[in-house]
Image (cartoon, helix red, strand yellow):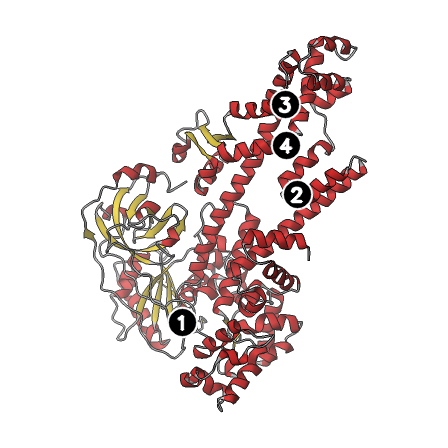
């Protein structure tokens, strides 16, 4: 383990060197982030998944710096230009940009104006001008030869050489880099003739802002517009400030020679330094904006994956449509398809009667407990049709976000699951399964297709994939999965497994039947001791040989729990079921070199609520009556809605009119907030006030200030441990109606708000 890496990481993250080193060791041994976070708290000092992930990322970053440094040292050494001072400087540099600055004078050069001038023999003249700036220019005449026709040509060549020296000076580049950092502005202008085509970017037609103050969505909007040929942009400080800084370092005389150096300095900045640093800062700004956008996407994805599940219940799922009808499927409590058909509930004839009859028949035949309706085209109308049906028993109707369902239905995964059914059937199945267990179904879809990102197609795709994959892994392991029912797609995200071992587990189930205990995992082909260690605690077995197998307690601690039970003169089952027995246990009595107090407290919590599900209880939501299209919405209305997307500048809310409205960050709360996640969460049920409607541009401006009190509505209550046999009904609110409310003084901010919808 590199001691310098340990020191750098611990300093950057504000943790001890021991924490950093121990975590790095665990990662190098093949332990996963979820495993380390949950089962190695004593080793890491209770670092969470985010901190462990950062350690993993920083390790890679410093390894890249090491590799680049080694190459630079090797190259300079081969040139026989290495000095002890230069080597020390290289070894103490941990920023890639600074390494490149040091390397620049030694970097093999392509043909430049300076190299051409050097070939003409003008380097001595450049040296003379640079070192004796109080002198005159008479020496230039001595450099006239076959290649240099005049003294002015000689001076021009000398200036080219001096400009390159200035450009390659690491101290100068560092000073300019600081100037760019503190005073650089991102400026954009519209390309002539592109005004109409780029109307959605008109806020940026004549735009300038300090780069370090710019929010990520503005940076990405300008870069996107530039890529589309609508804008051109630049990043730079005030030019006079930059040239003054360069002159202060290099212009040291007052003679004619100094004037030549001043000209060379101006040329160096305009032709070499500014373009180079602008590209660097453009890349840095893009990377920073990318990361902020990726963080927003990742948090949205986390909330979506951890959405409240209905649980294992029979479901009828409907993928709505007008002309082609509604594809309808019946699913059992595990999401297996029992039947499928097409109905036409929205036609004003016998077909709607047939649709009602079929749904009633299926609800009785397949013991349906809930109906899922996709929220796309014809969703509201279909939902209202279903809610009017008298099924003779309580059946709740849920609107399900169908974003990405079409991507799944056409995917290889869907074809493998349902080879004999077309994409419409597969899409309806996916909608129903999303209601039963959103996490288990959404892991089959590329997260980018789910539609909760901000500029997701503009950011670094490799960074986006890494971040989203990490979120999926975190969510799946946080919830845990049923070893005997989980699909290979879900199992693949479990710590220590991956696609190959997940497939082997499913194959083992088919050949040998259900697992009855976790130790049988070791019989799975290629699942060795390390994989078992990493995955076992996240896999659940219901009604197995050992009740601990249906908990998050790791098998490595089973003997400890048996010891606890024995000292209480009880069984492990009794210990899990009786609170009074657990209260008699003092965790400090069981602290050892291997097991600390943190792990013992986790174990006792898990014994109290084995296999608890961290997700919320599902709840019923209903849109306002009479609100189906944008024309139905009027300023001042107070409407119920569901948060569908969160960005850096606000939250989008579905109010039931096929076009989500935007609640700008300034209207999310009565108090100041810097992050929309402080006020709302994805899928949260909220009350919003309509500020403005623009039907032509499909824009709805909303506010959560003073709507249903000063704070947004709650998104639900924490659920108790999931019990498959429980029969609690979801909470249901009275059917809301649109209400009129007096408009507050929001208009001042609306102009700035409008153009953020598409940007």
**Which residue position is annotated with label 3?**
250
Question: In the image, what residue occupies the spot 55% across and 54% down?
Answer: 13
Q: Earlier in the sequence, mark 3 or mark 1?
A: 3
Front in this rendered view, residue 486 or 619: 619
For numbered disc 4, what is the local secondary structure?
helix
Location of residue 131 (image quadrant): top right
Q: Is residue 145 in view?
A: yes
Front in this rendered view, residue 519 or 191: 519
Q: Is residue 702 above or below residue 333?
A: above
* Disc marking residue 171: 4
Q: Earlier in the sequence, mark 2 or mark 3?
A: 2
**Which residue position is annotated with label 2?**
93
Q: How far is disc 1 from disc 2 in space, using C-alphas?
A: 54 Å
Q: How far is disc 3 from disc 1 in space, using C-alphas?
A: 72 Å
Looking at the image, do the residues carrying marks 2 and 3 touch, with CB atoms under 8 Å apart?
Answer: no
How many other residues sit within 10 Å of disc 4, few (<14), some (14-19) or many (≥20)?
Answer: some
**Which residue position is annotated with label 1?**
311
Q: Is residue 243 above or below residue 587?
A: above
Question: Quarter of the image containing the C terminus?
Answer: top left
For numbered disc 1, what is the local secondary structure?
loop
Q: How far is disc 4 from disc 1 in space, using C-alphas?
A: 63 Å
Looking at the image, do the residues carrying marks 2 and 4 touch, with CB atoms under 8 Å apart?
Answer: no
Q: How far is disc 2 from disc 3 in space, using C-alphas?
A: 25 Å
Q: Earlier in the sequence, mark 2 or mark 4?
A: 2
Image spot of residue 254 (x, y percent): 62, 14
Q: Earlier in the sequence, mark 4 or mark 1?
A: 4
Q: Earlier in the sequence, mark 4 or mark 3?
A: 4
Q: In the shown orientation, is residue 708 left or right of residue 223?
A: left
């Amino acid at each position: 383990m590199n001691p310098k890496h340990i020191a750098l990481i611990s300093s950057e993250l504000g943790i001890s060197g021991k924490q950093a080193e121990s975590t790095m060791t665990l990662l190098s041994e093949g332990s996963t982030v979820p495993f380390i976070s949950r089962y190695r708290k004593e080793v890491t000092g209770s670092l969470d998944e985010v901190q462990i992930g950062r350690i993993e990322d920083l390790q890679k970053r410093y390894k890249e710096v090491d590799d680049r440094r080694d190459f630079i040292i090797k190259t300079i050494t081969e040139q026989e230009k290495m000095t002890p001072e230069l080597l020390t400087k290289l070894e103490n540099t941990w920023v890639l940009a600074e390494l490149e600055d040091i390397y620049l004078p030694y970097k093999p050069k392509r043909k430049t104006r300076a190299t051409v001038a050097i070939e003409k023999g003008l380097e001595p003249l450049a040296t003379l001008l640079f070192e004796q700036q109080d002198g005159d220019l008479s020496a230039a005449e001595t450099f006239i030869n076959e290649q240099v026709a005049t003294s002015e040509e000689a001076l021009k060549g000398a200036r080219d050489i001096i400009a390159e020296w200035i450009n390659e000076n690491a101290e100068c580049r560092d000073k300019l880099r600081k100037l760019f950092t503190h005073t650089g502005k991102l400026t954009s202008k519209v390309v002539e003739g592109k005004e109409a085509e780029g109307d959605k970017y008109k806020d940026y037609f004549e735009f300038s802002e300090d780069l370090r103050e710019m929010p990520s969505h503005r940076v990405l909007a300008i870069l996107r517009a530039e890529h589309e040929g609508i804008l051109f942009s630049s990043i730079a400080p005030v030019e006079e400030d930059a040239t003054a800084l360069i002159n202060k370092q290099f212009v040291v005389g007052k003679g004619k020679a100094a004037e030549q150096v001043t000209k060379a300095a101006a040329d160096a900045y305009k032709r070499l330094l500014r373009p180079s640093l602008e590209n660097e800062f453009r890349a840095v700004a893009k990377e920073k904006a990318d990361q902020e956008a990726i963080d927003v996407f990742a948090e949205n994805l986390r909330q979506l994956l951890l959405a409240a599940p209905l649980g294992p219940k029979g479901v009828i799922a409907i993928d709505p449509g007008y002309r082609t009808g509604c594809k309808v499927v019946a699913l059992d409590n595990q999401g297996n398809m029992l039947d499928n058909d097409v109905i036409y509930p929205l036609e004003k004839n016998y077909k709607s009667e047939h649709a009602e009859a079929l749904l009633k028949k299926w609800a009785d035949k397949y013991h349906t407990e809930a109906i899922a309706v996709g929220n796309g085209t014809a969703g509201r109308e279909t939902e209202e049709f279903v809610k009017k049906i008298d099924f003779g028993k309580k059946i709740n109707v849920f609107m399900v976000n169908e974003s990405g369902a079409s991507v799944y239905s056409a995917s290889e995964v869907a074809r493998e699951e349902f080879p004999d059914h077309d994409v419409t059937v597969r899409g309806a199945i996916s909608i129903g399964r999303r209601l039963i267990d959103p996490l288990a179904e959404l892991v089959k879809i590329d997260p980018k297709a789910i539609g909760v990102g901000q500029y997701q197609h503009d950011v670094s795709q490799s960074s986006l994939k890494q971040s989203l994959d990490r979120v999926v892994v975190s969510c799946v392991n946080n919830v845990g999965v049923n070893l005997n029912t989980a699909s290979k797609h879900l199992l693949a995200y479990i710590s220590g497994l991956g696609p190959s071992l997940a497939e082997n587990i499913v194959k083992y189930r088919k050949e040998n039947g259900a697992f009855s205990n976790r130790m049988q995992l070791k019989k799975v082909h290629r699942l060795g001791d390390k994989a078992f260690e990493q995955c076992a605690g996240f896999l659940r077995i219901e009604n197995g040989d050992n009740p601990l197998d249906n908990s998050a307690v790791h098998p490595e601690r089973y003997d400890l729990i048996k010891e606890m039970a024995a000292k209480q003169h009880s069984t492990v089952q009794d210990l899990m079921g009786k609170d009074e027995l657990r209260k008699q246990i003092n965790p400090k009595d069981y602290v050892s070199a291997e097991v600390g107090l943190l792990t013992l407290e986790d174990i006792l919590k898990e014994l109290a609520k084995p296999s608890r599900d961290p997700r919320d209880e599902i709840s019923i939501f209903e849109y306002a009556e009479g609100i189906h299209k944008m024309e139905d919405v009027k300023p001042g209305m107070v409407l119920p809605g569901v948060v569908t997307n969160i960005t850096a500048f606000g939250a989008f809310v579905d109010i039931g009119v096929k076009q989500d409205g935007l609640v700008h960050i300034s209207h999310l709360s009565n108090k100041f907030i810097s992050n929309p996640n402080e006020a709302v969460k994805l899928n949260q049920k909220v009350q919003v006030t309509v500020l403005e409607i623009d039907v032509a541009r499909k824009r709805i401006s909303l506010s959560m200030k003073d709507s249903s009190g000063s704070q947004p509505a709650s998104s639900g209550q924490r659920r108790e441990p999931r019990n498959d046999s429980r029969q609690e009904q979801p909470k249901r609110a009275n059917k809301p109606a649109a209400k009129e409310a007096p408009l507050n003084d929001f208009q001042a901010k609306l102009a700035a708000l409008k153009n953020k919808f598409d940007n």
